[in-house]
Amino acid sequence: MDLLNNDNLKKAKKKSSSFTILSNDSTDGHGGYGAGVINLDNVTPLFIDIEEKEAFVDMGALHARSAVEKRVKFIADEEAVPKEGLKRYWLVWVTIDTKDKKPYYSGVAACYMTVNKQAKRGYKSMPEHVNHMDKSLKGKLVVSQMDDSSRQVLKAFLKNHNEEMWNHSSQELHAALESSENVNN
């Protein structure tokens, strides 16, 4: 659409999205316009490089625009992604909440993905990513599918990032990162 054409510009302004993501609460509790939107202020996307055993935050993942995801076409068939040059990741949605006026890690949900930058192809399940982000926002823990090594990387990252938040977090989270049980699903 040519947005420089005034007629097209007017048409474009009339269209609106029925789904909105806000960074602040526009409703201030009144429940009117903007109620029911997703507030992503308290969720952080954390990548774990499975082979390198390292974790890093990339906020671009909130909109599938992280450095890992850029210039990659994602497909739903993991076997169709070329193996040579393949990197495996966990994208972990970490949600922070407060109780007793102290912040803690309330929701943690991991999603598997692969990326082959050379082939510009990758695998991820978009429904899984969306559902796990939602579970994290709701304070759920979904980490049992992770390998033990990656769970230890995640535990070390969360603890080193803010030990007070780690200490205020639930014993279920601590146990979930120690064992292979999926807690609170």
Image (cartoon, rainbow, N blue to C red):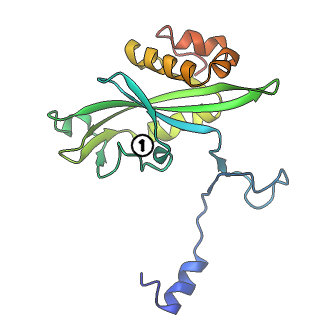
Q: Where on the picture, by quarter, is residue 15?
A: bottom right
- Badge 1 crowding class, 10 Å Cα cut-off, few under 14, some 14 to 19, many 20 or more, is some
Q: Amino acid at mark 1?
A: Met
**Lateral position of residue 156 relative to residue 117, left or right:** right
Q: Secondary structure at mark 1?
A: helix
Up-down: is 39 above or below 51?
below
Percent position (x, y) of residue 14? Answer: 60, 79
Percent position (x, y) of residue 137? Answer: 63, 35
Q: Where on the picture, by quarter, is residue 148?
A: top left
Q: How many marks?
A: 1
**Residue found at x 42% / y 81%:** 1
Q: Residue furthest left?
A: 84
Percent position (x, y) of residue 10? Answer: 57, 86
**Lateral position of residue 23 relative to residue 75, left or right:** right
Percent position (x, y) of residue 103? Answer: 72, 27
Q: Quadrant of the C terminus?
A: top right
Q: Residue furthest bottom?
A: 6
Q: Residue furthest right?
A: 30
Residue that mark 1 sits on: 126
Up-down: is 25 above or below 42?
below
Q: Who is closer to the viewer here, 142 or 93?
A: 93
**Residue found at x 59% / y 79%:** 13
**Residue found at x 49% / y 8%:** 179
Q: Who is closer to the viewer here, 158 or 21?
A: 158
**Residue found at x 50% / y 41%:** 130
